Structures are given as C-alpha cells and as structure tokens.
Image (tube, rainbow, N blue to C red):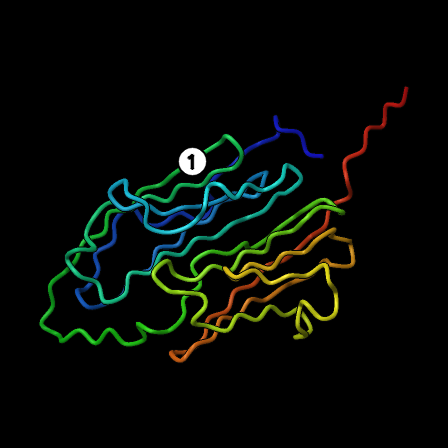
Amino acid sequence: MVQSHWEHVRLKTLPPVRVDGREGGEVVLTCSATGSPAPSIAWYKDSLFVSHMDWSVEESAGTMGETVARLTLPCLAPSDVGSYECRARSGEQEVSALTQVNTVPTDLTPSCSGADRPLISLWKKTYMVEEGQQAILSCRVKENQDIRDYQVVWTTSDGQPAQGNDIRFRLEENGDLIIQKVTFADMGQYTCTVTGAGGSDSVHTFLYPLAPERNLLRH
C-alpha cells in the first residue's frame, strides 16, 4: 500500500481571485486538486459550508488522482456576494484558495434560463487505485439539487453501460460508481451523464489501476 508519509495535496486549477458577475447572470467557479490519497474538495462561503464534499468519506491510502469541484451560482443576486473558499484535503493535508464574488447592477431583466438543468458539481478527472482495492468514481450534482430527481448513467469509453452484468460495479444513491476489487482490465474512461427535464450534464473520469506495492525484502 502507499504509505501515509507520502500524503500530499496541491491545487491544480485555481478559481480567479475576484469575479464580478452581472445580477441575474451566472457565475461558475472551478477548483481542482491532485493528491494521494485522492483529494476531497469542499466549497465555503464566508467560512460557512456551501457544497461538497463529505469529509467523513476518506479515500484509502492506495489511491491518487485529481478531483474537480464546480460551484455554479445561477441567477446571481446580492445575497451571493461574499468570499468563497475552495478547500482540498488529502489525508491530514489541506490547501485552499479564496475568490471574492461581487455583483454588477444591470438594466436588463434577469432571465435565469436553464436554472432547472442538472449540474454536476464534483467528480474525479483522473483516479488511480491499487489493483484489488475499491474505486470510488464520484458524480455529485449541485448541492441544492436532489440526485433522485434525475437519471444517472455511467458508461465506458465504448458507450456501453459501466455496470453491465459485473456485480463488482454498483451505482450509489448519490451518483457515485463503486467498483470492487479493481483489476487492470477496468482501466479506461468512464462517463457520468445526469439527465432531467431541464437537460443533461456529463463528466469524464479516467481510471488507472496500479500494481500493488510489494515488500521486496524477505526474511
């Protein structure tokens, strides 16, 4: 297994330091982090939790990868003004970045179109896990949207359902795809598509199984 002293995390995609959004418009903040174990990411507004991820869900030591968290503020209003913080955690390590969001008044009538479309807010862009271990491929919708209102489908690179007839694959209620006892044959790109009355959204995760660490010193 990957040892705990290898724990590390760093931000890869940083949101801008300041965003001035038009009232009634949409602001999208994207943050990604790489690390080992695969990082968890949460968004905070003025130090209060806003969106993903559950810190109680810890990745095993034998994982690495890049996690992406996308915070969407549709129909921007003065109440959205504030300091937004992206916090990424891997093991005991944590890093963060701040973004100040402001609103700009406009004479245009807010349309707020597409407010009902499903929005995927957290996923893993790349995910590496030791063979034989469990893989958690995340696909979480926007915090104020209920995943039960949408259809979630995971497919492989050839467009086939990821679950198929393999009992090792399980779709969680939160949209995550769990793969038990990962093998090298599971390597490839997996696509999560969330569909609802307002449209659909898709993200991709590349899964790369790693050969287990072996102790070469025999007594």
**SS label for mark 1:** strand
Name above or below for residue 165 compared with residue 184: below
**Where does the image place residue 180, in percent across and percent down from the top left?**
70, 53
Residue 142 appears in which quarter of the rendering? bottom left
Residue 38 appears in which quarter of the rendering? top right
The one nearer the camera, 149 or 21, is: 149
**With 69 as the anchor, is 22 left or right in this view?**
left
The residue furthest left is 107
Q: How many marks?
A: 1
Q: Badge 1, how many Cα within 10 Å: few under 14, some, many 20+? A: some
**With 161 as the anchor, is 140 left or right in this view?**
left
The one nearer the camera, 10 or 73, is: 73
**Where does the image place residue 48, in percent across and percent down from the top left?**
28, 43
**With 23 as the anchor, is 32 left or right in this view?**
right
**Where does the image place residue 154, in percent across and percent down from the top left?**
60, 68
The residue furthest bottom is 197
Residue at the (62%, 51%) spot, across then down:
127
Name above or below for residue 35 compared with residue 171: above
Name above or below for residue 49 compared with residue 186: above
Residue at the (66%, 29%) spot, across then down:
3
Quadrant where the N terminus is found in the figure: top right
**Where does the image place residue 128, in percent across and percent down from the top left?**
65, 48
**With 94 as the anchor, is 112 left or right in this view?**
left
**Residue type marked 1:** Val
Quadrant where the C terminus is found in the figure: top right
Residue at the (36%, 47%) spot, across then down:
43
Name above or below for residue 177 compared with residue 109: above
Residue at the (21%, 48%) spot, across then down:
82
Location of mark 1 (residue): 95
The residue furthest right is 219
